[in-house]
Amino acid sequence: MENNENTTLKSNDVDTSVKPTDAANTVKTADKSKSQSDAPPLLTISTSPHIRDSINIQGIMLTVIVAITPAIVHGIINFGMNAFINLAVGAISAVLAEYIWQKAMGQKVTIADGSACLTGLLLAMSISPLLPAYMVAIGSAIAIIVAKQSMGGLGFNIFNPAHIGRAALMVSWP
């Protein structure tokens, strides 16, 4: 490439010249008769994300839940029914808190995406299995309402909601 005001890219018989003042930005071939729309693009410039996939939010949450399932099973085997109860209470109360909050605020209910369930599971996995179920429910509600929904919902929270719920439990019941 030359270091002047024209940048020239060559691919087979296509010569692309871009001038800073050229508003049309045409692609010129050897006979200089084809426009940019006729020639295949050499370079596509666009905003991110550049790699796209067909997976949606629900698919991502389900994948994460499947990924943490071995740890959940291990916790239930090692700590018994207390761990299972905390996991169930955490997931159910998080989903319920999100449903109630979104209904009260007149928002579209998004509990089917699985993010609230995942938050409740992560909270329950991070606390002691000996913690009473009502504390798990309070922690899940704080995680969803304070750390997730009050910040704007999924993707807008600046901290992990499960960690905020755990921190609230640690401050409230040391």
Image: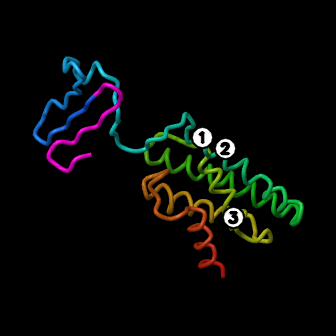
Question: Circle 3: is it few (<14), some (14-19), or many (20+) Cα within 10 Å?
Answer: many
Disc 1 marks which amino acid? Gln
SS at circle 1: helix
Residue placed farthest to the left in the image?
21
SS at circle 2: helix
Residue lying at 56% horizontally and 62% vertically, measured from the top left: 161
Label whose residue precedes the other's in the sequence (3 or 2): 2
Nearer mark to the viewer, of 3 and 1: 1
Label whose residue precedes the other's in the sequence (3 or 1): 1
Nearer mark to the viewer, of 3 and 2: 2
- Residue 4 counted in the magenta span: yes
Residue on which the image places disc 1: 58
Question: In front here: 25 or 110?
Answer: 25
Q: Do the residues labelled 3 and 2 touch (CB within 8 Å)?
A: no
Rendered location of residue 78, percent (x, y): 88, 65
- Please say if 66 is above or below 31: below
Q: Give the range drawn in magenta.
A: 1-14
> Rounded to the nearest whole Å, what is the CA distance between mark 3 and mark 1?
24 Å
SS at circle 3: helix
